[in-house]
Amino acid sequence: MSPSAVPARALLPYPLIVLVGFLSIALPLPVLSQHVNEGLGFSLLTAGLVIGLQSIGTILTRQWAGRLADRAGSRRAVLLGLPLAGLSGLLSLLSALMPDPVPALAVLVVARLLMGPAESLILVGAMTWGITRLGAARTGLVMTWQGMAIFGALGIGAPIGLWLMGRFGFAGVSAAMIAVALLGLALVLPLSPVAPLARGARTSALGVFGLIWREGTVLFLSAAPQALLSGYVALHFASRGWEGAGLTLTGFGVGVVATRLLFGGMPDRLGGRRVALISLGVEALGQALLWTAPGPVMAVVGATLSGAGMSLIFPAMGVEAVRRVPAASRGLAVGSFSAFFDAAIGLAGPVGGLIALVGGFPAVFLAGGIACLIGIALLLRGGWGHA
């Protein structure tokens, strides 16, 4: 059966793999700082560095994961990523059981570093698997649902991780990470690999970067406001004496999910560039409302609009990025493109801190709006023809 004839429901296993795989990533996130600070007795700075190690590992291995998916197949990439996630959980469990905090921290650092390539392999492998199964013409649909799976895993994993920490300690969280990774393997093993990607000359990593840097930069600019919102909205509310900061994050999530459910097929139908232009405009409006909000209600509205605007930019620009590279380098393109999102999440935090220090917390959202406007300007420039 040709990819174009495959029904959309055939996509279901691949977001499910991402949902389960990312649960192993999401479970420890809300409790790592508590474990390092209170359990092991290290500073909050050390705790922050331990949390950030995974992001560093992810950014550094996105392209490697893409090459592996292109050469060895998407299924093999996922089958490597899930055991790595399980191994990270096993080392985390070992760390939790060690009586001496210094060796325990060293083992935990290795565990966090392993989770970086695990995340890359699971996401890039499952995404290229879905694109190959359904065909490049439905790249936007694949990326939309993979993104939904990630948000779902983060939303489910955080409260479960907190509950496990309170009931069983960090050892219980680590054991759950192992169990979830094994569940992911049970889902993947019965699935047959899809036909290999088109053979032919593959583009180098530098060549792929040269083809997709515009799309990646737009993604970077659209993702930065998400990280700024997550990192600074609570401090902004506190500085104004407002309550309900958590509702802004809820509103952001509702905007993301509702937009993907209602309009997830638009990037494939209308073209990624057109959808991204509209989306960035909505996101910029949301950031402007956050910047100027006279009270918490308007801030929540702004956060919801920001989520709705950001929601489709990953699949929209992903459609354009995949179209620009040869089919034999599709995995490398997906990995390279995704790294722009990781970079935005990693850099926005410290940059936002400097902005807040100089201009106050509202200036953080002004910067987010400016980032969206720069993205619009980049989209309106020439050079967007297909490779």
Image: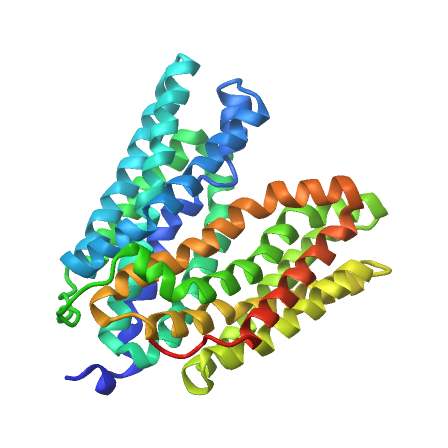
Of the pair 326 and 251, the residue shown nearer to us: 326
Q: Position of residue 201 (x, y in %)?
A: 16, 66
Q: Position of residue 243 (x, y in %)?
A: 79, 50
Residue farthest to the top, as pictured = 100
The answer to whether residue 156 is visible is: no
Task: Place residue 90 in its image quadrant.
Answer: top left
The answer to whether residue 134 is visible is: yes
Of the pair 17 and 168, the residue shown nearer to us: 17
Asked if 143 appears above or below 73 in the picture, the reply is below
Q: Position of residue 158 (x, y in %)?
A: 50, 47
Residue ID at (37%, 40%): 57
**Is the N terminus in the top left, top right, bottom left or bottom right quadrant?**
bottom left
Asked if 30 appears above or below 314 in the picture, the reply is above
Residue ID at (33%, 57%): 335
Asked if 163 appears above or below 120 in the picture, the reply is above
Q: Is residue 184 shown left or right of residue 1?
A: right
Q: Is residue 176 shown left or right of residue 34?
A: left
